[in-house]
């Protein structure tokens, strides 16, 4: 790090401008001065929001939870900002440089925005304390001053000095820091008068004082005008709130403000952006799950593995705040471990389910999902003229699979009955079979596990409800409908625009919601307990996926905890889906080539054996797009991340586009140029 010198106006004391500074270098610049004066906000402490006004969003949320206001947090922020502006304007001609926090809330009380001005003033100070952290290099330097050096904090703020002192103490600046603030003195640094008060109050000569600050006018120019040397510690400038963010839910706005408060660069920024782009959706979905359980009067909630891993962790934190008597459980189930045993008495339905769910998988793996070992599967398939490596085609293999199951049904049914008994043992052991209503939580998209659980355990519609990110139109059936299942983003295809967004990259939801452990294949006895048997993922791809899942979980929980500290548990009942999907929407529909390449390094789409994980995108060569556009379009449409497949297949400089855009443009091109 180095020191940069700025020019000074005539009569000003010398100015030292320090780039981001280690404590030792800063401490050397304070040596020889008897009094160290330090600005508070953005110098001694840093806010975890990009703009001070965003503190009012959290204050509004807490105030509403405490019945101190009836307006929305977004509205409270605007009322609070306007009240401060109006008060400053009214006092501008009275020789008063600074207003006081209590005066702002007294004005808001006369306008019926708040009910208790004193309580609101205390509340805002509490929120300020929750969003402030020490600027560590400054704190370390100031806590290492010589015994004959004195430290005073000098701040332009509406907060009372007593409250600022407590805030500083909480950030590690000693038990009783001395504070001189503009609200108490009725004059501020910007006018220069607060530096005069500093000299009067302390009795030091200006030449004995050095001031640290981040504002080039209030901290630097005004100090120099009083003969006080200034050390400039410029803070990183935060980007403004994006236009697409400002109209979203206040929790989303707070999250974005927090991200902008400490901008990252390079690889760290890219990694953080990728892992945190699902946080708001995770939080919104978790709130939706709890709201849906309240609406249905259900206390027992089962988060299904692996997709329920992070939502359960967030829901536990939410319930710890609300103190509601929910029972949150993690149920180690999967389509493979539940659906096949559930249809062990119905071979025809089992074959139809296999063809619908496992299309594209090797036939050997398909029989493996029914409990048939590899050698036996090869023999069974050979009798029907099929090979274990052939990929399942729902149309071509329906009848041959019926033949295989019909010829060997006694053997297969026995294996399935054994698995069914173990599955029921696991469900009983987990408490799932206890009487009473329960709610299952999953990503979606067809509700097959809910249907399988209901059939397996003989549960009625009133006993089992489902909560999903989304449900496709094909999921609607007499067993699963709007009465016993709900979707957060969309349910049974409605609203259609949200469904189209999900269809562009439905696998991306599953990537971000994937738990670090492998998929549940079946159950086995371990002594007297039934335990889930997880698929052992192929390496090194399995380790890559696990690291990605762990990094995503850390990012989500860290951001939740930061927001929770600001809100002090005053979470809203819900976050609208449009706001919650904001960060993930572009990745789903219009990813960059680098994002596709990064995600394609993670093999996370697993087969029925739980080991043969695949990546999300298999690009279509450009020559194939030109030679067979219609077939290429169908191939991309079947991709688990179809917008990613488009981006990976189309060369630069063709812009990123959604699948709908691509299909429309390709068909227009075919109409204009029929030979394409």
Image: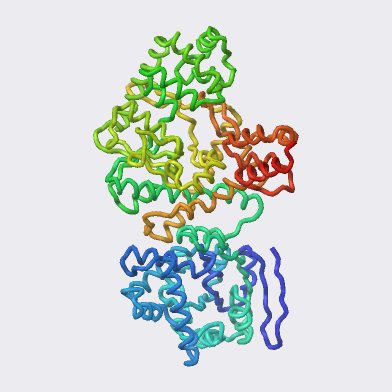
Q: Please, is residue 443 above or below residue 379 in the view?
A: below
How many numbered dots are placed on residues in this image?
Answer: 0
Q: Quadrant of residue 478?
A: top left
Name the residue at the left extreme. Answer: 435
Could you tell me which quadrant the C terminus lies in? top right
Residue 207: tell me if it is visible: no
Rendered residue at 58%/21% (across/down): 391
Q: Please, is residue 4 above or below residue 642 in the view?
A: below
Report x, y in % for residue 18: 66, 69
Who is closer to the viewer here, 531 or 110?
A: 110
Position of 570 with respect to 503 (left or right) is left
Who is closer to the viewer here, 137 or 208?
A: 137
Q: Quadrant of residue 117?
A: bottom left
Position of 269 with respect to 423 (left or right) is right
What colour scheme has been applied to the protein in the rendered image?
rainbow
Position of 289 with respect to 628 (left or right) is left
Residue 582: tell me if it is visible: yes
Rendered residue at 61%/30% (across/down): 540
Report x, y in % for residue 458: 29, 27
Who is closer to the viewer here, 74 or 532?
A: 74
Could you tell me which quadrant the N terminus lies in? bottom right
Report x, y in % for residue 172: 47, 64
Name the residue at the top extreme. Answer: 383
Rendered residue at 42%/81% (across/down): 100
Q: Quadrant of residue 601?
A: top right
Q: Please, is residue 466 above or below residue 117 in the view?
A: above
Report x, y in % for residue 430: 32, 31
Who is closer to the viewer here, 336 or 635?
A: 635
């Amino acid at each position: 790090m180095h020191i940069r010198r700025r020019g000074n106006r005539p009569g000003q004391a010398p100015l030292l401008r320090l780039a981001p500074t280690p404590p030792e270098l800063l401490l050397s610049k304070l040596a020889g001065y008897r009094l160290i004066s330090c600005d508070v906000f953005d110098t001694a402490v840093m806010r975890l929001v990009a703009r001070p006004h965003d503190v009012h969003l959290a204050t509004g949320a807490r105030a509403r939870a405490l019945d101190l206001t009836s307006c929305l947090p977004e509205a409270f922020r605007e009322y609070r900002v306007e009240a401060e502006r109006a008060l400053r304007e009214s006092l501008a001609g009275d020789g008063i440089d600074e207003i006081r926090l209590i005066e702002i809330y007294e004005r808001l009380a006369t306008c019926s925005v708040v009910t208790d001005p004193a309580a609101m003033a205390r509340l805002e100070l509490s929120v300020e304390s929750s969003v402030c952290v020490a600027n560590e290099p400054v704190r370390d330097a100031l806590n290492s001053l010589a015994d004959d050096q004195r430290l005073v904090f000098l701040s332009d703020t509406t907060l009372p000095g007593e409250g600022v002192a407590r805030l500083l103490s909480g950030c590690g600046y000693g038990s009783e820091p001395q504070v001189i603030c503009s609200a108490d003195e009725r004059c501020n640094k910007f006018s220069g008068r607060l530096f005069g008060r500093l000299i009067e109050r302390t009795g030091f000569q200006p030449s004995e004082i050095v001031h640290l600050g981040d504002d080039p006018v209030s901290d630097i120019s005004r100090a120099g005008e009083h003969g006080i040397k200034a050390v400039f510690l410029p803070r990183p400038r935060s980007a403004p709130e994006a236009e697409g963010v400002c109209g979203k839910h206040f929790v989303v706005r707070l999250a974005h403000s927090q991200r902008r408060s400490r901008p990252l660069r390079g690889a760290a920024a890219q990694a953080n952006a990728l892992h945190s782009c699902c946080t708001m959706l995770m939080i919104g979905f978790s709130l939706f799950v709890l709201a849906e359980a309240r609406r249905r009067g259900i206390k027992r909630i089962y988060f299904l593995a692996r997709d329920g891993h992070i939502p359960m962790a967030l829901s536990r934190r939410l319930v710890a705040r609300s103190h509601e008597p929910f029972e949150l459980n993690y149920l180690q189930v999967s389509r493979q471990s539940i659906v096949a045993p559930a249809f062990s008495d119905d071979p025809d339905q089992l074959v139809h389910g296999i063809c619908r769910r496992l299309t594209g998988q090797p036939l050997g793996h398909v029989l493996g999902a029914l409990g048939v070992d590899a050698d036996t599967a090869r023999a069974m398939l050979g009798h029907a003229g099929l090979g274990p490596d052939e990929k399942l085609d729902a149309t071509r293999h329906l009848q041959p699979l019926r033949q295989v199951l019909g010829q060997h049904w006694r053997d297969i049914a026995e294996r399935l009955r054994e698995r069914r008994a173990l599955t029921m043992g696991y469900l009983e052991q987990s408490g799932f079979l206890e009487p009473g209503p329960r709610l299952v939580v999953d990503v979606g998209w067809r509700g097959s596990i809910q249907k399988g659980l209901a059939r397996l355990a003989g549960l009625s519609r009133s006993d089992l409800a489902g909560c999903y990110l989304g449900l496709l139109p094909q999921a609607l059936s007499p067993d699963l409908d709007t009465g016993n299942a709900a979707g957060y983003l969309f349910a049974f295809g409605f609203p259609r625009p949200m469904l189209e967004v999900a269809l562009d990259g439905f696998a991306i939801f599953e990537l971000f919601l994937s738990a670090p452990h492998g998929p549940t294949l079946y159950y086995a006895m371990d002594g007297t307990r039934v335990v889930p048997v997880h698929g052992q993922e192929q390496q090194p791809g399995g380790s890559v996926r696990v690291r990605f899942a762990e990094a995503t979980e850390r990012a989500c929980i860290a951001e939740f905890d930061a927001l929770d500290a600001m809100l002090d548990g005053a979470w809203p009942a819900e976050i609208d889906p449009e706001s919650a999907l904001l960060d993930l929407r572009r990745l789903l529909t219009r990813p960059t080539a680098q994002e596709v390449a990064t995600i394609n390094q993670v093999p996370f789409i697993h087969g029925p054996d739980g080991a043969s994980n695949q990546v999300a995108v298999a690009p279509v060569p450009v020559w194939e797009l030109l030679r067979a556009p219609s077939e290429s379009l169908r191939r991309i449409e079947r991709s688990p991340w179809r917008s990613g497949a488009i981006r990976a297949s189309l060369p630069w400089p063709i812009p990123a586009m959604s699948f709908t855009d691509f299909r429309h443009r390709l068909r227009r091109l075919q109409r204009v140029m029929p030979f394409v």
